[in-house]
Amino acid sequence: MGLVLLARLVLFLLGVIASQRSFAAYRARRRDPQAPRDPAADLAWRLIGIGAGIFITAALAVQLIPRMPHGMSSALFGLTAIGIVVAFVGCAVAGWRSRP
């Protein structure tokens, strides 16, 4: 059990490091007008932001609207799932592009 937890922790830390590098490069490109553009990485970070926004908005709507009709709640849960998938796709692209 302890070895599995250690392996998960190492993989998590590697993912956080790769994400930080990718986001730092994205911020540097956005701040410097002379820097070369990387459309794939920019798209990845846009997807992450859009997916997170969709997820948060739909999840808050489900929690805050009392006695929601079944059809509306199903649609919002579908939007939540779409937001998660879009954010995961963005994370996959950002991680793929941040390889050394």
Image: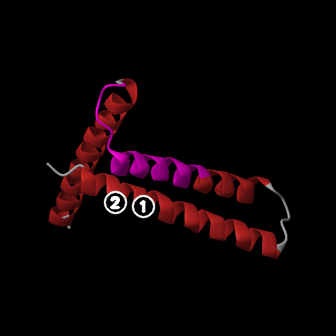
Q: Find disc 1 in the rendering and name its residue.
A: 88
Image quadrant where residue 30 sits: top left
Q: Is residue 39 magenta?
A: yes
Colour theme: secondary structure
Residue 83, quarter of picture: bottom right
Tell me if label 1 and label 2 are in contact, CB under 8 Å. yes
Q: Amino acid at mark 2?
A: Ala
- Which residue does the image show at 21% across and 56% down from the upper left? 11
Residue pictured at 35% horizontal, 51% vertical: 40
Residue 2: image location, x then y, percent? 18, 62
The magenta segment is 33-53
Q: Position of residue 55 (x, y in %)?
A: 59, 56
Is the residue 56 above or below the residue 7 in the image? Answer: above
Q: Which mark is residue 92?
A: 2
Asked which secondary structure carries label 2, the reply is helix
Q: Amino acid at mark 1?
A: Phe
Q: Position of residue 35 (x, y in %)?
A: 29, 29
Q: Is residue 18 above or below residue 8?
A: above
Quarter of the image that includes the N terminus: bottom left
Q: Main secondary structure of the magenta part?
A: helix
Residue at 40% over, 52% down = 44
